[in-house]
Image (spheres, grey):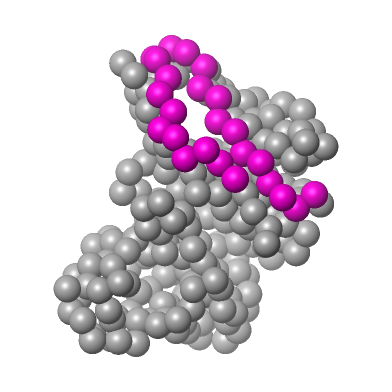
């Protein structure tokens, strides 16, 4: 089974703080993704990475950055947290083979006060 | 803009009945299709994959695919209260990018 581990289930931070969300996978998958999910808006892709040190912007990258220094770890960084970044953040992985599903971590519920 | 459309619901179904969830997609050359179940406050969990036209059954779940109509559905037989969740449809487009629908909320009435 694919194991995708997100560092925190719940996180509370203050406006202006720099926030790090970590995601680690144990299946040697090439591709990793960060989404946020808000009621009525569905899953929105923030950033993804298809290889170490490679990153691509998703649909809503503003206010975020990412880091992938090792294949198994993909970090999402909120440079200066704002209240509109309060959300559920989901990490997902995908093998490099075609036509395969993504596998999700448990999610991090982030609240920015 | 490639899209995956689902009725947001809520869809209310009596316990023991068949729940039918529908999804349409815009990219005609999509090749793989997935259904995820997401309980409130939890992350999406893959429950079905389907790649060719027709039906695919797994326990109480049946996925149906009609590529000509660009339509994929999920049937849940003998619905249980534990099936109450949001169901996400996901489609791989021609670039092998996965596009998610916004989900349908299903409520099974005891």
In the image: residue A17, left or right of residue B48: left
In the image: residue B21, left or right of residue A96: left
Is B63 placed above or below A80 here? above
Is B18 placed above or below A64 here? above
Q: Residue furthest top?
A: B16
User: How many dots with numbers?
Assistant: 0
Is A105 placed above or below B86 here? below
**Residue located 77% across and 36% down the image:** B69
- Residue A41 lies in quadrant: bottom left
Front-most of A90 and B12? B12
- Residue B9 lies in quadrant: top left
Front-most of B28 and A77? B28
Task: Examine the structure image and report whether residue B25 is included in the region drawn in magenta.
Answer: yes
**Residue located 75% across and 64% down the image:** B95
| Camera sees residue B84 | yes
Residue B74: x percent and y percent?
59, 30
Front-most of A99 and A12? A12
Residue A22: x percent and y percent?
38, 73
Residue A49: x percent and y percent?
58, 76
**Image quadrant in which the C terminus of chain A is located:** bottom left
In the image: residue B17, left or right of residue B61: left
| Camera sees residue A25 | no
**Residue located 63% across and 57% down the image:** B98
**Residue located 75% across and 53% down the image:** B27
Residue B48: x percent and y percent?
60, 37
Task: Examine the structure image and report whether residue B88 is included in the region drawn in magenta.
Answer: no
Q: Which residues are magenta?
A: B5-28
């Amino acid at each position: 089974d694919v194991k995708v581990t997100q560092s925190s289930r719940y996180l509370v931070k203050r406006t202006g703080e720099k926030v790090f969300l970590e995601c680690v996978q144990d299946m040697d998958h090439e591709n990793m993704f960060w989404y946020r999910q808000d009621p009525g808006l569905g899953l929105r892709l923030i950033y993804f990475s298809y290889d170490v040190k490679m990153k691509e912007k998703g649909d809503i990258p503003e206010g975020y950055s990412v880091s992938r220094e090792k294949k198994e770890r993909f970090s999402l960084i909120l440079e200066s947290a704002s209240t509109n970044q309060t959300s559920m953040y989901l990490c997902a992985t995908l093998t490099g083979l075609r036509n395969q599903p993504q596998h999700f971590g448990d999610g991090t519920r982030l609240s920015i006060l | 803009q490639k899209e995956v459309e689902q009725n947001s619901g809520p869809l209310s179904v009596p316990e023991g009945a068949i729940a039918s969830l529908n999804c349409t997609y815009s990219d005609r050359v999509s090749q793989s299709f997935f259904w995820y179940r997401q309980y409130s406050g939890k992350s999406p969990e893959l429950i079905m994959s389907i790649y060719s036209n027709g039906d695919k059954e797994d326990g109480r779940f049946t996925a149906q695919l009609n590529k000509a109509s660009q339509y994929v559905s999920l049937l849940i037989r003998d619905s249980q209260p534990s099936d109450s969740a949001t169901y996400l449809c996901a489609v791989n487009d021609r670039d092998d990018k996965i596009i998610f629908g916004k989900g349908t909320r299903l409520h099974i009435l005891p």
